[in-house]
């Protein structure tokens, strides 16, 4: 892995997990020294992170980690809800047996970590991202595959920012079991309902945290 790629992945992960706090200034010289990377590749990384909505480059001010706004999360949830209804329709028709096996494997690995008391927010986030990536790929729709991961990043940042507990994230995977069953039965309406319920549970947890 190149220095540029490893630096990008590290900064991206630190922003998503709130290791770098929303609104925190990012100083080029400090990062260049910390990651032993040149100014040009670092600025290219900044542009990539800006495209993902993870940082803000403000003229004559500097670069900072993008802030998190409650109203923005509401907007993201509204858009994701409707897009995932399309995901449910397309994936139920187009998902392959191999992709269903992959989804089941993710659930088994999460359950194994839980039994062994080895689950962490970071590992669960990794598996959650994998699950949704496979689900989106199953649609065979490139536009959805480009749009939805960006929304997922915003919601994942919010998970870390608010400080959801491990048990809450584990319950998150219970909903995904119903998604798999519905996909196996090629039942688009059932997949759509399962995805909707899944998002509803997230909204309920958000309300419990901020009210």
Image (tube, grey):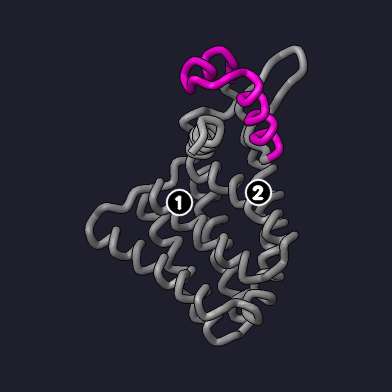
Residue linked to disc 2:
150
Q: Quadrant of the C terminus?
A: top right
Estimate how packed mark 2 is, as few (under 14), some (14 to 19) or many (20 or more) residues with alpha carbons within 10 Å.
some
The single residue placed furthest to the front in the displayed view is 2
Check residue 203 for magenta coloring. Answer: no
Q: CA distance from mark 1 to mark 2?
A: 15 Å
Check residue 46 for magenta coloring. Answer: yes
Left or right of residue 90, residue 129 in this image: left
Q: Position of residue 96 (x, y in %)?
A: 57, 78
Name the dominant secondary structure of the magenta segment: helix
Looking at marks 1 and 2 on the same chain, the residue that comes earlier in the sequence is marked by: 1
Residue occupying image coordinates x 50% and y 45%: 159
Estimate how packed mark 1 is, as few (under 14), some (14 to 19) or many (20 or more) residues with alpha carbons within 10 Å.
some
In the picture shown, does residue 178 fall above or below 36? below
Residue in front for this viewpoint, 119 or 139 = 139
Magenta range: 25-51
Q: Position of residue 94 (x, y in %)?
A: 64, 78
Label at residue 125: 1
Q: Position of residue 35 (x, y in %)?
A: 48, 23
Residue occupying image coordinates x 69% and y 42%: 71
The single residue placed furthest to the left in the displayed view is 116
Left or right of residue 67, residue 3 in this image: left
The answer, for residue 211, to whether it is visible in the render is no
Residue 56 position by quadrant: top right
Q: Secondary structure at mark 2?
A: helix
The answer, for residue 1, to whether it is visible in the render is yes
């Amino acid at each position: 892995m190149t220095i540029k790629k490893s630096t990008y992945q590290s900064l991206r992960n630190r922003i998503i997990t709130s290791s770098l706090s929303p609104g925190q200034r990012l100083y080029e010289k400090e990062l260049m020294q910390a990651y032993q990377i040149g100014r040009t590749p670092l600025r290219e990384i900044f542009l990539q992170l800006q495209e993902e909505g993870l940082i803000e480059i403000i003229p004559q001010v500097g670069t900072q980690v993008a802030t998190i706004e409650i109203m923005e999360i509401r907007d993201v949830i509204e858009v994701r809800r409707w897009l995932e209804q399309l995901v449910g329709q397309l994936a139920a028709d187009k998902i392959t047996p191999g992709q269903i096996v992959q989804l089941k494997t993710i659930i088994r690995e999460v359950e194994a970590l839980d039994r062994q008391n080895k689950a962490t927010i970071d590992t669960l986030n990794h598996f959650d991202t994998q699950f949704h990536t496979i689900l989106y790929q199953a649609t065979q729709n490139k536009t959805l595959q480009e749009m939805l991961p960006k929304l997922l990043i915003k919601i994942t940042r919010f998970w870390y920012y608010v400080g959801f507990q491990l048990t809450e994230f584990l319950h998150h995977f219970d909903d995904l079991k119903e998604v798999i069953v519905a996909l196996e039965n090629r039942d688009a309406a059932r997949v759509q309902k399962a995805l909707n319920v899944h998002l509803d549970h997230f909204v309920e947890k958000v309300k419990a945290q901020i009210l």
